[in-house]
């Protein structure tokens, strides 16, 4: 298993175990992809890019993770409310990863917009993680 997969496996229970987030999203609100006719709001794991970040003495990887928050009825306000909860749960978090160590996990950007084709709101949160 790669560190990227271990990182995703550590993030999912952190999010699904939060009572405030589950109250907004429901029990199936964290997804690997946006399903047709998805129950909204939901969080979707988006792009994941991994780069070698090794030093002369330590193996390491740098990961860029995109989390997408999709909302319909309550739109941008609801997406940004969920984004604030995600920031609190993940920014500078300590996560247990099987077989790897998380050195750093920081939010690097956030972008909220209306999706032209569906008229849904999406808030994209980008995180940078470093693992050993």
Image (cartoon, grey):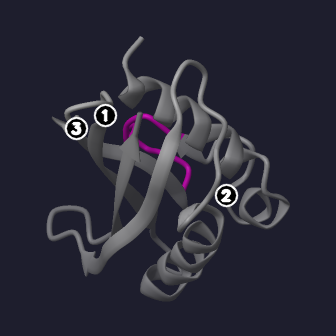
36 to the left or right of 16? left
Q: Is residue 36 magenta?
A: yes
94 to the left or right of 71? right
Find out whether the residues at labels 3 and 2 contact each other: C-beta distance under 8 Å: no
Alpha-carbon span between mark 3 and mark 1: 7 Å
For residue 25, which numbered disc appears in the image?
2
116 to the left or right of 10? left
Q: Residue at x 16, y 63 (%)?
A: 117
Find out whether the residues at labels 3 and 1 contact each other: C-beta distance under 8 Å: yes
Q: Residues within 10 Å of mark 1 (few under 14, many from 20)?
A: some
The residue that disc 1 covers is 60
Q: Could you tell which of marks 3 and 2 lies nearer the N-terminus? A: 2
As helix, strand or loop, the secondary structure at mark 3 comes to loop
**Residue with the most extreme top position:** 1
Query: Is the stretch drawn in magenta largely helix, strand or loop?
Result: loop
For residue 55, which numbered disc appears in the image?
3
Q: Nearer the viewer, residue 55 or 4?
A: 55
82 to the left or right of 108? right
Tell me the magenta residue range.
Answer: 31-40
Q: Is residue 125 magenta?
A: no
Q: Is residue 78 above or below residue 35?
A: below
Q: Residue at x 66, y 51 (%)?
A: 15
Q: Is residue 122 visible?
A: no
């Amino acid at each position: 298993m790669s560190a990227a997969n271990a990182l995703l496996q550590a993030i999912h229970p952190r999010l699904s175990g939060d009572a405030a987030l589950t109250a907004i999203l429901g029990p199936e609100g964290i997804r690997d992809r946006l399903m047709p006719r998805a129950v909204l709001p939901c969080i979707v794991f988006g792009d994941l890019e991994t780069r070698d970040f090794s030093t002369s003495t330590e193996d390491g990887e740098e990961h860029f993770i995109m989390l997408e928050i999709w909302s319909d009825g309550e739109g941008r306000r609801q997406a940004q409310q969920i984004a604030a909860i995600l920031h609190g749960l993940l920014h500078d978090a300590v996560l247990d990863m099987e077989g790897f160590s998380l050195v750093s996990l920081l939010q690097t950007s956030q972008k909220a917009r209306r999706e032209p084709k569906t008229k849904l709101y999406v808030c994209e949160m980008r995180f940078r993680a470093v693992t050993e």
